Image (cartoon, rainbow, N blue to C red):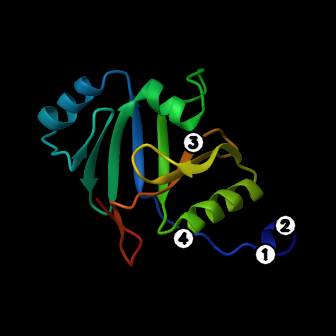
């Protein structure tokens, strides 16, 4: 591979977390927990996480998620983010840089965040919003799967 992308190392091919922006967190929790029988693995005032096989699903208030991603709910932001969790802050920075070099728009440079981790966001060329994060409470297993 030649050019600007030729010097980049391949990124692990995995998705760690899908976060759905919801209009009413309590209503969404009721749907997933009572409607589907799912049990939350972790819940805070603003967000809830469910462990799925090798991946996690998060529910986060739509406006709060849009604010966190610095991407307004403007008809283009669907209220869904896809996350790649990394093992170190340096890996978060490298992934964001790699995405930007490949044509992504950085929406929020990586920074330490309220939940104790390190996180940044980018939009892919089609506007899909991705979070790249280090969550010190979660484990990235040797095979790349996530355990909350």
SS type, badge 3:
strand
Q: Are marks 1 and 2 in contact (CB under 8 Å)?
A: yes
SS at badge 4: loop
Q: Secondary structure at mark 2?
A: helix
Which percent across, then down, holds residue 146? 35, 64
* Rendered residue at 48%/48% (across/down): 82
The Cα–Cα distance between marks 2 and 4, rounded to whole angstroms, is: 19 Å
Q: Which residue has dot 2 on it?
A: 4
Give the mark nearer the N terminus: 3 vs 1. 1
Label 3 crowding class (10 Å Cα cut-off): few <14, some 14-19, many 20+?
Answer: many
How far apart in space, not on screen, are marks 3 and 2 (Cα)? Answer: 23 Å
Residue 70, quarter of picture? top right
Determine the secondary structure under disc 1. Answer: helix
Q: Residue 12: which disc?
A: 4
Q: Which mark is residue 7?
A: 1
Q: Is residue 5 above or below residue 58?
A: below
Instruction: List x then y, in percent, for residue 125.
Output: 70, 44
Whichever of callouts 1 and 4 sits on the residue coming sooner in the sequence is 1
Q: Earlier in the sequence, mark 2 or mark 4?
A: 2
Q: Position of residue 137 (x, y in %)?
A: 33, 60
Instruction: Give the quarter of the figure containing the N terminus.
Output: bottom right
């Amino acid at each position: 591979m030649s050019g600007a992308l030729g010097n980049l190392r391949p990124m692990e091919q995995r998705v760690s977390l899908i976060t759905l922006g919801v209009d009413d967190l309590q209503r969404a929790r009721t749907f997933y927990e009572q409607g589907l029988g799912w049990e939350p693995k972790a819940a805070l005032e603003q967000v809830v996480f469910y462990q799925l096989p090798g991946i996690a699903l998060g529910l986060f208030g739509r406006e709060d998620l849009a604010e966190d991603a610095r991407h307004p709910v403007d008809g283009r932001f669907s209220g869904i983010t896809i996350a790649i969790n990394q093992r170190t802050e340096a890996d978060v920075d490298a992934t964001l840089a790699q995405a930007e070099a490949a044509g992504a728009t950085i929406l929020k440079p990586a920074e330490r965040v309220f939940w104790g981790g390190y996180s940044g966001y980018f939009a892919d060329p089609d506007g899909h919003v991705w979070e790249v994060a280090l969550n010190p409470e979660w484990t990235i297993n040797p095979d790349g799967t996530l355990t909350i």
